[in-house]
Amino acid sequence: MSQYKIALIGNPNVGKTSLFNKLTNLRQKVGNYPGVTVEKREGNIERNGNKFSITDLPGTYSIYPSSLDEEVVLKILGDPSNKLYPDLAVVIGEPSNLKRSILLYLQVRDLGVPAIFVINMKDEIESKGLSIDLKKLEVFLQTKIYLTNARTSEGLDELIEAFTKPANSYSPKFVVPNDYLAAVANIKEKFNLDSDYIAWQYLSQKTIPFLDDEQQVQLDKIKSELNIIPKRLQVKETLDRNKLLEEELHDIVSYNFKQKETFTDKIDKTLIHPVFGYVIFLGILLLIFQAVYAWSAPLMTMVEDLFGWIDETAISLIPAGPINDIITGAVIPGIEGVVVFVPQIAILFLFISIMEETGYMSRVVFLMDRWLKPFGLSGKSVVPLVSGAACAIPAVMSARNIENDKERLLTILVTPFMTCSARLPIYIVLISLVIPDETFLGLSYQAIALFIMYLLGVVGALGSAVILNLIIKSKHKSFLIMEMPTYKLPDWKNVILNVWEKTLGFLINAGKIIFAISIILWVLGTFGPGEQFNNAEEIVTANNPKMDEGDLENEIASYKLEHSYLGKLGTFIEPVVEPLGYDWKMGIGLISSFAAREVFVGTMSTVYSLGEVDVEDNQEKNTLLDRMKSEINRNTGEPTYNLASGVSLLLFYAFAMQCMSTIAIVKKETNSWKWTLIQTGFMTGLAYVVAFIAYQILK
């Protein structure tokens, strides 16, 4: 069986990924390219005794990268020793802007890569008013042209047959300008190159990704000696190629646009209107927020109920003892802590996929880019930021749609500042404790306080973005250059596949870290040193002989937590949190809520011997509030939860890293412990400083 490596290449919005999905029949694997957090899609198909390994390369407008994604294309196509270097490159264009796709094709062929040219969306040729002399175009491109329609699979069989045919011989179109002939000759000699165009790339690229450090230093030295400014060479090539295409394509490709407005034109009058466009987008964001936050609730409840049943079944089937304790107390809750996020992730990426498939996502980028660019963010950053108000985990994952590596990293680092739904139970309890239940001009002080907490999330995200934008450097400067695709009905196979891939990626990658930390926290809270922990039941029972069974059970749980390793850890960090107005019990709450923010309320209920409390149940919430109000801080002799300590705790939770699940997903998406730890340290440090200042001023 003969094997062939096929690479699909094309501009964004040409239907490349749809074509890839049809070719592979959704039998594909998704991962990252080695060393970078750029998504790689690969699929294998067999036809007529041949096996084809197809790689869907990131969308690019040229081989001059403006993002980490586009750099991958140069790294593969410019280096024949790369294991992904294709036997055949399939360059894909679409009727709206053939010239731009042809320019990319010529660059690929001039690199020496065997290639063919495909015009996808063939059904739009007539509707776009396009006239193509295919015979003349094939002569100019020196290849057969294939017409396809990825949505209907038209032309795919013929295209697959072409994978085994040798590419036509090709005479390079690029001519080195006279001013750079000597420099190109110098590079060819020093780096033992045969191709003028590859030597030109060495001069015109800022860096060559497949050179080692020593070779790059040598190249930089040569460019410095020759006064070569790479950007000028890129502009020179682009202008020369466009001039050539204007001359050659004049009689080959012509557009006879009809004067009447298209459906897309009519819709865009509203969707990208300077006023109504933002109103509609806000409405769509509210719908997404509602879906991620509220629509997922029944599904998440089903997951919790399912694992509750599994836990009860395990308790009844497994004999009492250490194995039962580990499985029912750690393993099952640990898995539940991963799976429970699946509904939110799936719903968020369902909306994102639909927006991308229909063409609306490009309008979102256009609308928001001008507002977010001053903060170092992208127009696409708005979706993660707003989604972060529901849950940071799917929000951080959605940042992978941002092509520029710096903008993607900035978005990931600042998104956890947004107030997620898991913080809401904490805010409800703390605001009820320290903010008077009174009104001003008809507005509740507590409602205003809750609004301020959400506003602080926005301020924290954008303010941090400004700071990080000055610190983080990027090899690629970002410009918003894009063509609005026409509106289309979504390809539901693509939508479902995208949702499946993102959800599965979370379960496999981030889930491992979440599960591991869940086990660690369970161990710390379940075991403890010394006689006080081991004999907790006897000690508490002896000290409370008349307490009823329910209260006694809660008291024992509270006593064991106090003397567990987690309790010891809370006592250990008390000197650190004391300047913020906290005692050791609040320290336990801070540590345990690292598993999930809403755990803080449950931990406080256990510490104060109240058992499990539902903050949506007014009676249970009031019981907890009364107990917390009566608590005295042993360090100050004052109520533990007063205005100063309450505001301090609110601010700490507003700015601190949200939870272990967020840390896990940031590590997965950045592929870097360095940035994950920097983010966690920065947010924790900021939270500590702000909480400290607030407490010292208000106490």
Image (cartoon, rainbow, N blue to C red):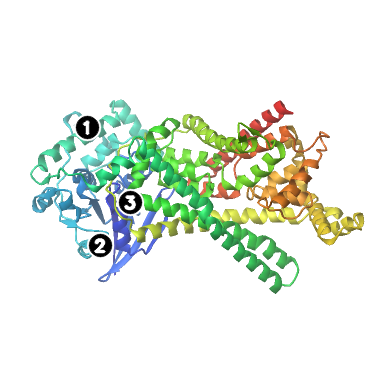
> Mark 2 and 1 residues: CB-CB less than 8 Å, in contact?
no
Q: Image point 19% across, 59% down: which residue?
A: 166
C-alpha gap between disc 2 and disc 1: 40 Å
Mark nearer the viewer, 3 or 1: 3
Q: Residue 358 carries which label?
A: 3
The picture places residue 432, in percent across and down from the top left corner, at 69, 41
Q: Quadrant of residue 572?
A: top right
At x 71%, y 46%, the residue is 589
Please say if 111 is above or below 51. above
Callout 3: SS: helix
Q: What residue is at 31 percent from the left and 55 percent from the top? A: 489
Q: Which of 310 and 242 is in front in this view?
A: 310
Residue 287, percent from left and from top: 45, 49
Inter-mark Cα distance, 2 to 3: 16 Å
Examine the rendering and report whether any part of residue 72 can be seen.
no
Q: How crowded is mark 3: few (under 14 residues within 10 Å), some or many (20 or more)?
A: some
Q: Is residue 392 left or right of residue 6?
A: right
Question: What type is the residue that disc 1 sits on?
Answer: Lys
Camera-near label (2 vs 3) is 3
- Amino acid carrying label 3: it is Thr
Dot placed on the residue nearer the N-terminal end, 2 or 3: 2
Query: Can residue 530 be seen from the camera position used here?
Result: yes
Where residue 185 sits in the image (x, y, percent)? Answer: 22, 35
Quarter occupied by the N terminus: bottom left
Q: Residue at x 68, y 68 (%)?
A: 312
What amino acid is labelled 2 in the image? Thr
Task: Give the residue pinned by disc 2.
Answer: 152
User: Is disc 1 surrounded by few (<14), some (14 to 19) or many (20+) residues within 10 Å?
Assistant: few
Q: Label for residue 236?
A: 1
SS for dot 1:
helix
